[in-house]
Image: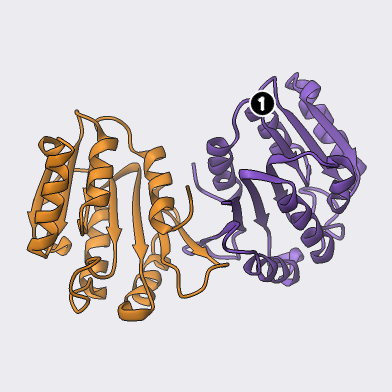
Chain colours: A purple, B orange
Amino acid sequence: MLKNAVKLSHFYLENFIKDGAFAVDATCGNGGDTLFLAELVGENGIVFGFDIQKEAIQNTRLRLENAKLSDRVQLFLDGHENMEHYLDSQLVDAVVFNLGYLPKGDHSLHTKPKTTISAIDTALKHLKKEGIVAVSIYHGGDSGFEERDAVLSFLKTLDKHIYNVIIHQYTNKPNNPPILAIICHND
Amino acid sequence: MLKNAVKLSHFYLENFIKDGAFAVDATCGNGGDTLFLAELVGENGIVFGFDIQKEAIQNTRLRLENAKLSDRVQLFLDGHENMEHYLDSQLVDAVVFNLGYLPKGDHSLHTKPKTTISAIDTALKHLKKEGIVAVSIYHGGDSGFEERDAVLSFLKTLDKHIYNVIIHQYTNKPNNPPILAIICHND
């Protein structure tokens, strides 16, 4: 149930996302989290999904169609750093990031510190009270450590009166297991 | 809701502990967690509570009596390193530790690395599949860092095929905020 960062993020999201919620998948990838969010928000909710790769958007669209959940999801072929334009003044209940490269995709295409941090910052500005941002951080191997270090440094600077930042590490596993960062709006 | 290690441990425990469960409070302190566990296990459940200080056991007993939940709790004036004798061959669903000293008590009396690790080891040996151990680790100030370092080192050695060890750190707070360790039996 809690065996890795993504499963752990689902544990939090299941507890925080209620029927009718507005959730964002900032990195659709192959659509696993987009589908999960679409199920959680229910038929009165809405999900926005972003990815910069056409293949990711196509895979996600197909997955949602197969699950007959497309009607509650809007997909955007654009980088999450442009989320602001699509959200406008709307507030969100949850935003999910999976950093790194597209699984089974081109490893040279991956999220980058500058745009990732800009997108997390936007997500936090649009977060409702008691809303949640979940960031699964892949590091080591092809992902390196630069993005991890930049994101963790950025999260340390968040105002403690407004946000609870919880960093999760699986310390009995080898080979740099992904880290989960959970940021809750505590205002 | 998730504003500190103890609240975060409650978030996990609420999700893991079902009606009729067998839970252990390894460090009763002033009884906050003992009471919380007694509520979670329901009228068909049972809670064992340990503390080495008479004052802690008295405070906990009073708190349970006021809540009319004493009948589902057994309190033992003994160190948690002796938990084995009381558990015998019974398996448990959840074990909670709050390391450090008794709040508002004598700061020179506090949990110690050797007995703490022995008790966590016993708890893990008695843990049911899908059971959970939650350890809130106070560090810095009067608590120092010795116990934190010893416990975190011990947890790193746990078999990854049997246990998921998740270390939680509040990285945007100053002054050594308590760390939460969650260990789930994943067999």
Vertical placement of residue B184 versus A174, above or below:
above
Choose between B163 and B172: the one closer to the eye. Answer: B172
Task: Pick whichever, B78 or A59, lies toward us.
Answer: B78
Where does the image place residue B115, in percent across and percent down from the top left? 20, 70
Is residue A127 among what the camera can see?
yes
Where residue A162 sits: x, y (%)? Answer: 60, 57
Residue B92 seen in this snapshot: no
Q: Kindly indicate the quadrant of the structure image that contains residue A120.
A: bottom right
Could you tell me which residue is drawn at 45 percent across and 68 percent down?
Answer: B177
Depicted A58 relative to depicted B102: above or below: above
Left or right: A165 with respect to B186?
A: right
Residue B23: image x %, image y %? 24, 44
Q: Please, is residue B65 above or below residue A186 in the view?
A: above
> How many numbered marks, from 0 up?
1
Label 1: which residue? A20
A80 sits left or right of B99 in the view: right
Q: Whole-percent x and y of residue B138?
A: 36, 69
Q: Which sits in the foreground, A182 or A126? A: A126
Q: Residue at x 31, y 80 (%)?
A: B142
Which residue appears at 16% of the width and 64% of the height? B81
Q: In the rendered view, does B27 fall on the left or right side of A65?
A: left
Tag 1 secondary structure: loop
Rendered image quadrant of residue B128: top left
Query: Which chain is disc 1 placed on?
Result: A
Is B151 or A3 nearer to us in this picture?
A: B151
Within 10 Å of disc 1 (Cα), the crowding (few <14, some 14-19, many 20+) is some
**Type of amino acid under label 1:** Gly
Q: Is residue B179 above or below residue B43?
A: below
